[in-house]
């Protein structure tokens, strides 16, 4: 599948995975999106969350600021076939009804002639892994949940939902 993701999102608060992507079919590009309550594999969530230290560094925020900060989205765009990202996170604040939302500036993939700060090599690796995991999610690889059967089944028998 030749897929270019434009959004990969998972938030603990709404328990939904949201993906947006363009897929090339011949000379046509088809834009698609998916919003699903199906839990992703834990590795997808962990990879999304692993952007937090990188985000704190880009925004020049101290590590303690990362407490209660949840990276929930990576937006991806392309300029001259080079990817660039914006990382979005939310932070719970004391007595407020809604979180504080924070975003990085646009961070392009590095190239030899690019002098300004863009994605670090760590971010490029995280993005590559996140896109692979999002493709697996599209292919149906989701977290497995276990449900106990009704009283007619022995208590040690469980079924997995796919």
Image (spheres, helix red, strand yellow):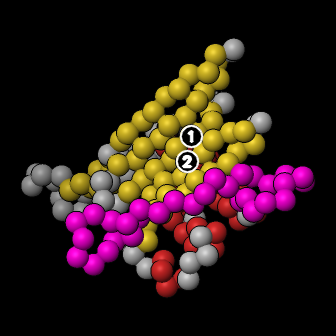
State the SS at label 1.
strand
User: In which quadrant of the rendered image does the C terminus lie?
Assistant: top left
Q: Is residue 102 highlighted in magenta?
A: yes
Crowd band around label 1 with a 10 angstrom C-alpha radius: few (<14), some (14–19), many (20+):
many
Query: Quick check: can you spot residue 43?
Result: no
Quadrant of the rendered image containing residue 120: bottom right
User: In which quadrant of the rendered image does the N terminus lie?
Assistant: top right
Quadrant of the rendered image containing residue 110: bottom right
Query: Quick check: can you spot residue 122?
Result: yes
Q: Residue 6 — which label? A: 1
Give coordinates of residue 9: x percent, y percent: 46, 50
Task: Kindly identify the residue that appears in the image at 37 percent across and 66 percent down.
Answer: 100
Q: Residue 52 — which label? A: none
Give coordinates of residue 57: x percent, y percent: 63, 73
Dominant secondary structure of the residues highlighted in magenta in the image: loop
State the SS at label 2.
strand
Q: CA distance from mark 2 to mark 1?
A: 6 Å
Q: Which residue is mark 2?
A: 75
Say above or below: 4 vs 37: above
Give coordinates of residue 97: x percent, y percent: 22, 66
Give coordinates of residue 49: x percent, y percent: 51, 65
Q: Residue furthest top?
A: 27
Camera-nearest residue between 38 and 30: 30
Q: Which residues are magenta?
A: 90-119
Mark 2 touches mark 1? (CB < 8 Å) = yes
Camera-nearest residue between 156 and 137: 137
Sooner in the amino-acid sequence: mark 2 or mark 1:
1
């Amino acid at each position: 599948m030749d897929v270019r993701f434009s959004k990969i999102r998972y938030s603990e608060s709404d328990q939904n995975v949201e993906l947006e992507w363009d897929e090339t079919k011949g000379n046509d590009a088809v834009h698609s999106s998916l919003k699903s309550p199906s839990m992703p594999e834990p590795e997808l969530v962990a990879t999304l969350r692993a952007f937090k230290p990188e985000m704190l560094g880009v925004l020049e925020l101290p590590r303690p600021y990362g407490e209660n900060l949840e990276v929930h989205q990576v937006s991806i765009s392309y300029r001259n076939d080079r990817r660039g990202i914006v990382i979005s996170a939310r932070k719970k604040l004391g007595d407020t009804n809604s979180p504080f939302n924070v975003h990085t500036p646009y961070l392009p993939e590095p190239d030899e002639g690019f002098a300004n700060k863009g994605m670090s090599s760590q971010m490029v690796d995280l993005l590559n892994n996140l896109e692979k995991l999002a493709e697996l999610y599209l292919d149906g690889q989701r977290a497995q949940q276990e449900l106990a059967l009704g009283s007619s089944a022995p208590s040690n028998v469980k079924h997995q939902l796919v």
